[in-house]
Image (cartoon, rainbow, N blue to C red):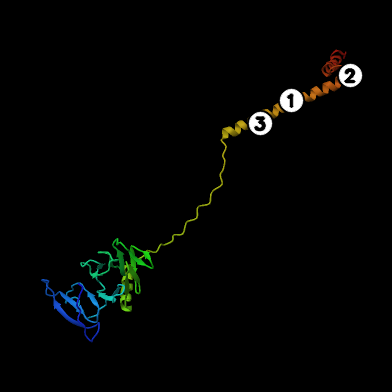
Amino acid sequence: MIDQHPTRGSLGFASFACCQPSHSSDPTEVEIEILGGWWLLSEKKSLKSHHPIRNLTMPRVLITVSEQTPQPYRFDLDRSSVKIGRGSDNDIAINCRSVSVHHAVMERVPGGFQLRDLESTNGTKIGGTRLAIIELTDGVSAKLGDVSFDFSLTAEEQSILAQEALQETPEVEQEVEIPETPPAPRQPRRTVKPASLSSSSASYNGWMFAAFLVFAALAFFIGLSIRHKKEVQQPLLKSMLQNEAPAKTSPE
């Protein structure tokens, strides 16, 4: 609810002019009109759960149109959204042609507020950069078209939002490092030859050695025969036979 005609008094912002019953069927709901030159954006509350004068925390928005008096607004810290635009159905109606009919919406998010652009013609900007969503913290200054939007929070409000953000942060489970078990030492490979192969190999080696001896003896005999023939002019075998013959025929 936007109060278009707030009454003024000497007590400043913390004073209230009245708490008038609304036209709602619930007699506990009220509309609040605040003093001190601030427009109050307030959702209807039950008097049993929330008294408007006690522990009042209200963030502030300052809307400034070129060559016009800045318009300050305050709203409940737990208000879910505030619609801003040129249309009269907005929570904050801005009479400026650079502002779209439904330009942006200020939304309550866990731990704070954000300003979301509603695909406006001239955009929602910070420092000349057009942004779809702007995180609202104390001292943020944005532009809705050519209109200045300044947001501020008290130290108490910042503390409340910081605690809320901390509660919303999910707990991160600590990862327990499990030491890796070193691999078992590798045993040296043992090559086992079958018994049949070993015996076959030994037999083969024996035959090869015997053949080598035969060939060696044959080569020795051939060499000896050649040398004997050169010296005696007859083969060695013939000389051996001649030497054996007299021994058999000699008388006793």
For the residue labelled by badge 3, is the local secondary structure a helix, a strand or a loop? helix
Q: Residue at x 60, y 31 (%)?
A: 200
Residue identifier under label 3: 205
| Sequence-first tag of 3 and 1 | 3
Give the image location of residue 120, x and y in percent.
Answer: 29, 62
> Which mark identifies residue 55?
none
Q: Which mark is first along the chain, 2 or 3?
A: 3
Does dot 1 land on a helix, a strand or a loop? Answer: helix
Q: Is residue 1 left or right of residue 59?
A: left
Placement of the N terminus among the 4 image quadrants: bottom left
Q: Residue at x 14, y 78 (%)?
A: 20
Q: Position of residue 28 (x, y in %)?
A: 13, 75
> Measured from the top left, where is residue 144 in percent x and y?
31, 67
Q: Position of residue 76 (x, y in %)?
A: 24, 74
Residue shown at 87% from the left, 20% from the top = 230
Q: Name the amino acid, label 3.
A: Asn
Q: Secondary structure at mark 2?
A: helix
Q: Are marks 3 and 2 in contact (CB under 8 Å)?
A: no
Tell me: residue 140, above or below residue 231.
below
Q: Is residue 241 above or below residue 152?
A: above
Of residues 247 and 105, the one nearer the viewer is 105
The residue indicated by pointer 2 is 232
Q: Amino acid at mark 1?
A: Phe
Identify which amino acid the numbered label 2 is placed on. Val
The residue identified by callout 1 is: 215
The disc, 2 or 1, on the residue closer to the chain's N-terminal end is: 1
Q: CA distance from mark 3 to mark 1?
A: 16 Å
Query: 58 above or below 90?
Result: below
